[in-house]
Image (spheres, grey):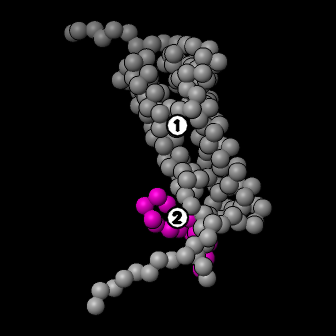
Amino acid sequence: MQHVERARLITFHVPSDQRLLAAFGEVALRHEHMNHVLKMTIKSLTGVTPAEALAATMFESSAQLRDRVRKIARKRLGDGAPLVRLQAMLAECKRLTEKRNDLVHGLWAQEIDGDAHVRDARGGTRPLPTVEELQELARELEQHTGRLNFERLEGFLLQALQNPPGPSRAA
């Protein structure tokens, strides 16, 4: 006899916990702050105005912004330590975006006679995040965004852009 899994009935779910919803909203806002700093990193790498950078990157996804930063940085910085440091920062941006995407793009649902959960695009489910988990993700986003912005304005990235690599010298 063949086992047939019966379809589970679900309903859309919006938590009533205002603290959870506020923490979810903070994650969304902090993520957009990170995207803005990626756009301003493009500005710094290219030397265009903030308005030009914003117009040129309007509606670009986080992945597109990271890819653009990576490509421009390789040309501007060469293959040295500043590029590797920036690539490491972009990898952290990707990790944080993936955590945020799992929540924002997941379907918040509740099975009839079951618990609320988040369904991902692959059909997997996980429990709703806690307020503390969301607050921790918001903190991570805030700290990483601040670090990237600092490096762009005062740190290794600014120094690398002020002292570009010279032509390689043959021995």
Q: Residue at x 44, y 23 (%)?
A: 73
Judged from this view, the residue extending furthest toward the left is 171
Residue on which disc 1 sits: 61
The magenta-colored residue range is 114-128
Amino acid at circle 2: Arg
Q: Is residue 156 above or below residue 2?
A: above
For label 2, the SS is: strand
Q: Could you say which is closer to the camera, residue 56 or residue 29?
A: 56
Q: Quadrant of residue 168?
A: top left
10 Å neighbourhood of mark 1: few (<14), some, or many (≥20)?
A: few
Amino acid at circle 1: Ser
Looking at the image, can residue 28 be seen? yes
- Asked if residue 130 lies in the magenta stretch, the reply is no
Q: Could you say which is closer to the camera, residue 126 or residue 9?
A: 9
- Find the distance from the CA under tag 1 to the CA under tag 2: 22 Å
Horizontal side of 71 relative to 153 (left or right) equals left
Judged from this view, the residue extending furthest toward the right is 18
- Asked if residue 124 lies in the magenta stretch, the reply is yes
**Quadrant where the image shows the C terminus:** top left
Residue on which disc 2 sits: 119
Looking at the image, can residue 154 be seen? no
Residue 23 in the image, given as x and y percentages of width and height: 71, 55
Residue 108 in the image, given as x and y percentages of width and height: 60, 63
Q: Could you say which is closer to the camera, residue 86 or residue 99?
A: 99
**Quadrant where the image shows the N terminus:** bottom left
Q: In which quarter of the image is residue 39?
A: top right
Q: Residue at x 57, y 72 (%)?
A: 10
Horizontal side of 22 relative to 27 (left or right) equals right
